[in-house]
Image: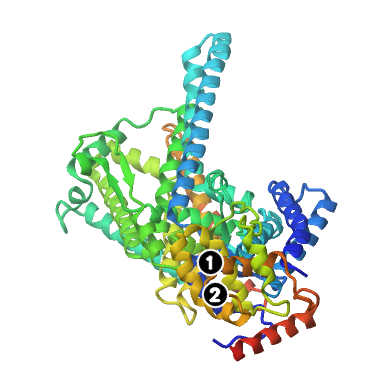
Amino acid sequence: MVRGIGGVNRPHANDHKGAIDTMMLVKTPENISFQYEISGPFYRFIAYLADLVFAFGGYFAAIGLLYFLLIMTALLIGSAIGNIPQFFELFAGVVFGLVLVGFFVVYWFYGAYMETRFNGQTLGKRLCGIRVISVDGHAIDGVQATLRNFFRFLDIMPIVPLQMLFGLEAQVLFAIPTFLIGLVVMSLNRKFQRVGDLVAGTVVIFEEKKHRPDLIEFEDERVPKLAELIPADFVASRGLTQVVAEFAEERKYLAPQRSADIAKHLAGPLMDRFGILGNTDPDLFMCSLYHRLFVNQEGREPQLGGGKESVELGALISGEKRSEQ
Amino acid sequence: MKVAELIKLRSPFWEELEDLSIQMGGRLSKADPECVSRFATLYRAACADLALAESYQLPPQTVEYLHRLVGRAHNQLYRSQSYQFKSWTKRIFSDTPRLIFNDPCIHIATILFWGLFLIAAFLSYNTAVWPGFSEAVVGVDGLDQLRGNYNQFGGNRGIGSGAFMMGYYIQNNATIGLQCFVMMLLVIPGVVVLSYNAIYLGAVFGFMFRHDSGAASENFQNFVTAHGPFELTAIILAAGAGLKIGLSWMMSNGLNRKDSLLKTARESLPIVMCAVVLFILAAVIEGFISPLGDFPWWGKGAVAVGSSCLLMIYFVVLGYPAAWPGGDEDGF
């Protein structure tokens, strides 16, 4: 594959990665591209359940409080006037009116308010480490937050009444939302957008903290020794460096035999070139190559990062070496 | 420089940025200015590190970490705008009425609703054309119940029950309106909901206006007059706004379907919010004025005329397109 020398932005490579790994590429005003990991239905469902608990828990707590206050004031003021029932009737109407309005407001506007106020996060989303952002990577605004929460009504469809399932003769109509439309629509697009997300132009992404990985230190004493055998003037190409790093990071998940199998294809020719004995463990060789490239770099030439020119020079040198191979 | 040294050199800055991201998770406006400035500097540095990650030959896991770090910091730096109430005046009193006045989808919804309503009302009123129409729509039990309800109408409700009914009407009617709006995305379900409401209401009106309904007829007229204009307009607005979104992705007018949907949804939201406000106004009238039995009918008529006038002023006077600056359609 032909690659531009010194090219930092490789849109094709990134797009490709995005296609496999549910990553989303965002270009910032600083002209930097970075990736977000898109959240799938599972975490979002948990966040939604948590939100239901928070929103309606708060709602019912408020109702309880109101009801308590209602009874207390009715007793106090009603007994002062000498007519408790009449006073109770007056205020009960107000309280239960508020309860109904409150249900309407919580049901339709809780998510919209929270997502606007807290930068794309409701309480449940914060708990799950996910956040809503615009498809272009910006923060969402009030219009988007409201739209995506309104259209949840379509996402939870079809709503199946309990009577239908069990043949109950219930007076109150209990119904179970199946979320099928939302699930199907999410699975049909790359960014896991439900109907509300498509209408509002939003995406839900992961935002949990990730620990900074340290460079890998090998306990095997032979690793630094073997690394010394690698010639000082050896400069690895970008591709090689990346392959070595990925191998070193992934090898702890592999059985020794398997990792040796993978390593030998690259380690074999390199060991030949460096004049290292062929019966050396290829896995061990790859580890020492990692050690040499990342941890203890003996090379004398001004390695990358010392300035733009040296970066390009380094790339050129490695490019030539690669073509020689 | 060795990669290990580079990472060692940069890590403190990355960690500081991470700590600041967490600190500023609450509110940026409340944060210390120096802190914000430091945060921005660190963010730019992290961006630069990420951009040069390949040149630095950082290992993939560190690059992934940087992506996350920059992403988190980006979300803290570019935050959602809170509601900007200043721009709302223009939006409420100038943009939205113009949008509503000129919108073909609202016209379609109006014609559909009123057409079906009037036809259903006529069929229900005139028993000769389609005998049993109102019974077929509302059901015999439903009609009996209706008549029964309005026979005993006239008691003077207190403020308490008025407030309760107001809450009930807001919850019930505005929910139906919003559901109709949302269902309109797929057009057919929304049209079914709108038509059902139009035909049902039409049948009830036709039935209650029949002379054989007796006292119930009079009470019914007394009850529905005051809040009618707001409530029926609100249903039409909600349905029209939804229809706009539903048609936008079918007829995208040269835009990409997704973009057309996004653009239209953004335009439609003020209309549906207007509908919600009308539902609330209607509920206030329906809760407090409509049930008053001893309130003279002309008084309720005056409320209806007054609210119709307000709607006219809002939609026609404020919405008339000649007042557009420049006169073209760049308002959309």
- For the C terminus of chain A, give its image quadrant: bottom right
Residue under the point 77% across and 73% down: A305
Q: Position of residue A143 (x, y in %)?
A: 57, 59
- For the N terminus of chain A, give its image quadrant: bottom right
Classify residue A145 as left or right of residue B167: right
Q: Position of residue B100 (x, y in %)?
A: 52, 65
- Disc marking residue B304: none
Examine the rendered structure and indicate whether residue B277 appears above or below residue A18. Answer: above
Task: Please name the residue that numbered disc 2 is placed on.
Answer: A267
* Amino acid type assigned to the residue bearing label 1 in the image: Asp
Mark closer to the chain start, 2 or 1: 2
Q: Are marks 2 and 1 on the same chain?
A: yes
Examine the rendered structure and indicate whether residue A279 appears above or below residue A224. Answer: below
Q: Chain of mark 1?
A: A
Q: Position of residue A161 (x, y in %)?
A: 27, 44
Residue under the point 51% across and 11% down: A83
The answer to whether the residues at label 2 and label 1 have Cβ atoms under 8 Å apart is yes
Examine the rendered structure and indicate whether residue B169 appears above or below residue B237. Answer: above
Residue under the point 73% across and 62% down: B7
Circle 2 sits in a helix, a strand or a loop, which is it?
A: helix
* Amino acid type assigned to the residue bearing label 2 in the image: Ala
Circle 1 sits in a helix, a strand or a loop, which is it?
A: helix
Q: Position of residue A37 (x, y in %)?
A: 54, 61
Q: Chain of mark 2?
A: A
Q: Residue furthest right?
A: B34
Q: Nearer the viewer, residue B101 or A201?
A: A201
The answer to which quarter of the image holds residue B257 is bottom left
Task: Please name the residue that numbered disc 1 is placed on.
Answer: A283
